[in-house]
Amino acid sequence: MTKTRIRALTCCAVCVALAFILSNVKLFMMPQGGSVTACSMFFIALAGFWFGPAAGIASGAALGFLELILGGYVVHPAQMLLDYPLAYGALGLSGCFREMRHGLTIGYTAGAAARFFMAFLSGIIFFASYTPEGQNTLLYSAGYNISYIWPEALFTMIIVSIPAFREALARVRKMIM
């Protein structure tokens, strides 16, 4: 294994650890699962942005399995895949935007949207019974999942837009690359 690959693996592991720690800092919890956390999705998107989509998706899947093992809720094997490794792995799609101007912001937004899509599908397929009577299941799943994924995404994008934060990230990236 080359020195560069070891460095990437180490950095991705640190990103997974930071994401997991921050996922336990819950700012708001939803009644049937999901919560607004303190920027936990960001570190998986960062791993993807710095080291490419494969590393980001693998980091996200690792986080998803950690979340599953240490407190997941499973009703079906396909739901387990959608809600954990696929949903968190989707955050690593940020790596597809690494060559673009504002690539981190665009990639993070794309990753959060992909995570939302996985949760939305899971809500429709496996949790439709939670839809209040008289409401559309598609709209309910969309609203429910938007209510915890997008507030965190918006909060994170505000943090990332702070010049001092961006400069600190650039310095860290320079040190690890």
Image (spheres, rainbow, N blue to C red):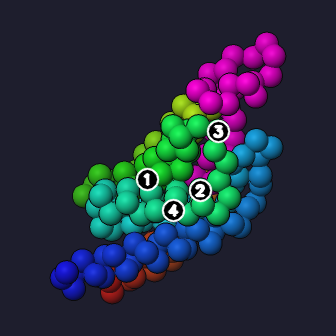
Residue at image point 39% right, 66% down: 47
Kind of element beneath mark 2: helix
Q: Is residue 80 visible?
A: yes
Judge the density around disc 4: few (<14), some (14-19), many (≥20) Cα neighbours within 10 Å.
Answer: many
Residue at image point 69% right, 35% down: 144
Kind of element beneath mark 3: loop
- Asked whether disc 1 touches disc 3, contact meaning CB atoms under 8 Å apart, the reply is no
Foreground pick, 66 / 11: 66
Principal secondary structure, stretch drawn in magenta: helix
Amino acid at dot 3: Val
Q: What is the quadrant of residue 6 in the picture?
A: bottom left
- Asked whether disc 4 touches disc 1, contact meaning CB atoms under 8 Å apart, the reply is no
Query: Which residue is identified by label 4?
Result: 63
Instruction: Report how far apart the C-alphas of labels 1 and 2 lie in the structure.
Output: 13 Å
Instruction: Report how far apart the C-alphas of labels 1 and 3 lie in the structure.
Output: 20 Å
Amino acid at dot 1: Gly
Amino acid at dot 2: Leu
Left or right, residue 4 beside residue 140:
left
Q: Which mark is residue 75?
A: 3
Query: Which residue is identified by label 2?
Result: 68
Kind of element beneath mark 1: helix
Instruction: Report how far apart the C-alphas of labels 4 and 3 lie in the structure.
Output: 19 Å
Residue at image point 67% right, 30% down: 127
- Of tags 4 and 3, which is closer to the observer? 3
Amino acid at dot 4: Leu
The residue stretch that appears in magenta:
124-153
Residue at image point 77% right, 46% down: 30
In the rendered view, tell whether residue 115 sits above or below residue 152.
Answer: above
Foreground pick, 25 / 124: 124
Query: Which residue is identified by label 1?
Result: 89
